[in-house]
């Protein structure tokens, strides 16, 4: 979805310049901001189709900006995270961010993540989601792997359904627990771990080396196209 407007928020001029040049070279329109306040003002004036957002800003955090944007915008948000900011990174994801990349930013990876989040926001209307040899029929609540039916419990299907609707997106433990089991289960990490393990046993060719359902240490899980 080149041609999309991307708002880049970072207080480091060198990073802003590099990202602006790379994104424009890839065909995107780019707006920039160096603070939380100017980011929200820029987003309100020229609503972006995607946001690349640093977690640490002079007048606030990326989490604050993500939460404020989610009050009115559905534009996908990719957070930029420095090593050691794991708690804040998870908080930003729980506040509505869609993904993250770690600084220093690898531009090829960032562009790939940007394309992925923009694809997810494009309307599809398809009741069937295919990921590699995994096929999830959302309407009929059925699953096949390499053409063979997979039998899931209701909670296992509900969990896979959330992943299938967010292919490639990092989903935090809190997001998954709230979506599948409800608000009262947001701290039930063991419940989620057990169900992910059971789901892997059924959909992974080798559950000891997952290719579809990947763990992001300390953050959550994501369903991906197998390499």
Image (cartoon, rainbow, N blue to C red):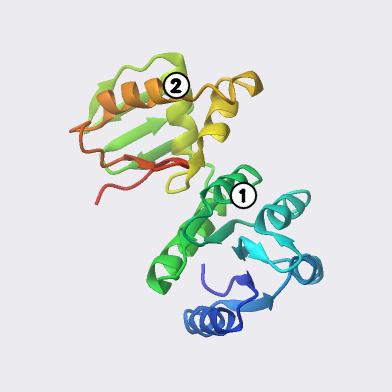
Where residue 215 sits in the image (x, y, percent)? Answer: 37, 40
**Percent coordinates x, y for residue 156 in the rendering:** 41, 21
Q: Residue at x 29, y 21 (%)?
A: 150
| Direction from residue 71 to residue 108 in the image, left or right | left
Which residue occupies 61% across, 64% down? 53
Camera sees residue 140: no
Extreme residue toward the front, this view: 84
What is the x, y in percent for residue 70? 72, 50
Q: Residue furthest left?
A: 206
Mark 1, residue position: 92
Q: Earlier in the sequence, mark 1 or mark 2?
A: 1
Q: Is residue 81 above or below residue 133?
A: below
The answer to whether marks 1 and 2 mark residues whose Cβ atoms lie closer than 8 Å is: no
Residue 223 picture quarter = top left
Mark count: 2
142 or 73, which is in the foreground? 73
Q: Position of residue 219 (x, y in %)?
A: 47, 42
Tell me the tag on residue 147.
Answer: none
Left or right of 133: which side holds 107?
Answer: right
What kind of element bears circle 1?
helix
| Residue matched to label 2 | 190
Query: 185 or 132, which lies in front?
Result: 185
The residue shown at (21%, 38%) is 209
**Does the rendering let one see residue 177?**
yes
Q: Residue furthest top?
A: 153
Category of crowding for the residue at label 1, using alpha-carbon neighbours closer than 10 angstroms: few (below 14), some (14–19), many (at least 20): many
Using a 10 Å C-alpha cutoff, classify the residue at mark 2 as few (fewer than 14 neighbours), some (14 to 19) or many (20 or more). Answer: few
**Among the 4 quarters of the image, the one containing residue 141:** top left
């Amino acid at each position: 979805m080149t041609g999309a407007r991307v708002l880049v928020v970072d207080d480091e001029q060198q990073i802003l310049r590099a990202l602006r040049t790379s994104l424009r070279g890839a065909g995107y329109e780019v707006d920039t901001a160096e603070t939380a306040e100017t980011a929200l003002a820029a987003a309100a004036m020229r609503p972006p189709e995607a946001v690349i957002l640093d977690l640490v800003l002079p007048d606030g955090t990326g989490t604050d900006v993500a939460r404020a944007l989610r009050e009115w915008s559905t534009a996908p948000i990719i957070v930029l995270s420095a090593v050691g900011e794991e708690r804040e990174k998870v908080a930003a994801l729980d506040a509505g961010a869609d993904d993250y990349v770690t600084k220093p930013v690898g531009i090829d990876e960032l562009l790939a993540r940007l394309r992925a989040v923009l694809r997810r926001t494009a309307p599809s209307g398809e009741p069937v989601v295919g990921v590699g040899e995994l096929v999830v029929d959302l309407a009929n609540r059925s699953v096949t792997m390499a053409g063979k039916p997979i039998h899931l419990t209701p909670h296992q299907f509900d969990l896979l359904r959330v992943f299938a609707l967010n292919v490639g997106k990092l989903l935090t433990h809190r997001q998954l627990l709230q979506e599948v089991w409800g608000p009262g289960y947001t701290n039930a990490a063991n419940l989620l771990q057990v169900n992910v393990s059971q789901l892997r046993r059924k959909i992974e060719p080798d559950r000891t080396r997952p290719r579809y359902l990947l763990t992001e240490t300390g953050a959550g899980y994501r369903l991906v196209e197998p390499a």
